[in-house]
């Protein structure tokens, strides 16, 4: 029987941070309302045309490189998004 192991974990986040003021302006509400709702959580935004697949590809490439592997060396990669 083959063994299974998680040998690397990587993440990739969009670079652009959206602050409360910018989101409030977009929604047409006060920034303090956004702060109250979000409770200080950070929001990030990808440029147009860049979705979860692009983020996952960069993270996957780093995970493989960190272990000295190529894509043909693994059976599958687990991808999750929120």
Image (cartoon, grey):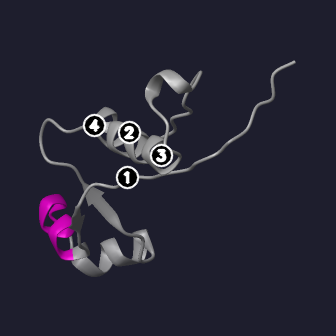
Q: Earlier in the sequence, mark 4 or mark 1?
A: 1
Residue tagged 4: 54
Q: Earlier in the sequence, mark 3 or mark 2?
A: 2
Residue tagged 1: 12
> Which is in the foreground here, disc 3 or disc 4?
3
Residue 20 coordinates in the image, percent (x, y): 25, 74
Residue drawn at (22%, 66%) of the image: 18
Q: Nearer the viewer, residue 37 or 72?
A: 72
Q: Nearer the viewer, residue 79 or 28?
A: 79
Q: Residues within 10 Å of mark 4 (few under 14, many from 20)?
A: some
Q: Earlier in the sequence, mark 2 or mark 1?
A: 1
Residue 40 coordinates in the image, percent (x, y): 41, 77
Label 1 to label 3: alpha-carbon separation: 11 Å
Label 4 to label 2: alpha-carbon separation: 5 Å
Q: Which secondary structure, mark 2? A: helix
Residue drawn at (64%, 45%) of the image: 7
Q: Which residues are magenta?
A: 21-28
Query: Disc 2, disc 1: CB below 8 Å?
Result: yes
Residue tagged 3: 63
Q: Residues within 10 Å of mark 3 (few under 14, many from 20)?
A: some
Q: Earlier in the sequence, mark 1 or mark 3?
A: 1
> Which is in the foreground here, disc 3 or disc 2?
3
Q: Nearer the viewer, residue 74 or 37?
A: 74
The answer to which quarter of the image holds residue 48 is top left
**Is 41 in the magenta?**
no
Q: Which secondary structure, mark 4? A: helix
Residue tagged 2: 56
Label 3 to label 4: alpha-carbon separation: 14 Å
């Amino acid at each position: 029987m083959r063994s299974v192991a998680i040998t690397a974990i990587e993440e990739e986040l969009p670079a652009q941070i959206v602050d409360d003021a910018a989101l409030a302006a977009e929604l047409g509400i006060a920034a303090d309302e956004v702060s109250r709702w979000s409770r200080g959580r950070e929001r990030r935004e990808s440029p147009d045309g860049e979705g979860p697949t692009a983020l996952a590809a960069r993270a996957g490439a780093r995970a493989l490189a960190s272990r000295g592997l190529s894509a043909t060396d693994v059976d599958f990669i687990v991808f999750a998004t929120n």
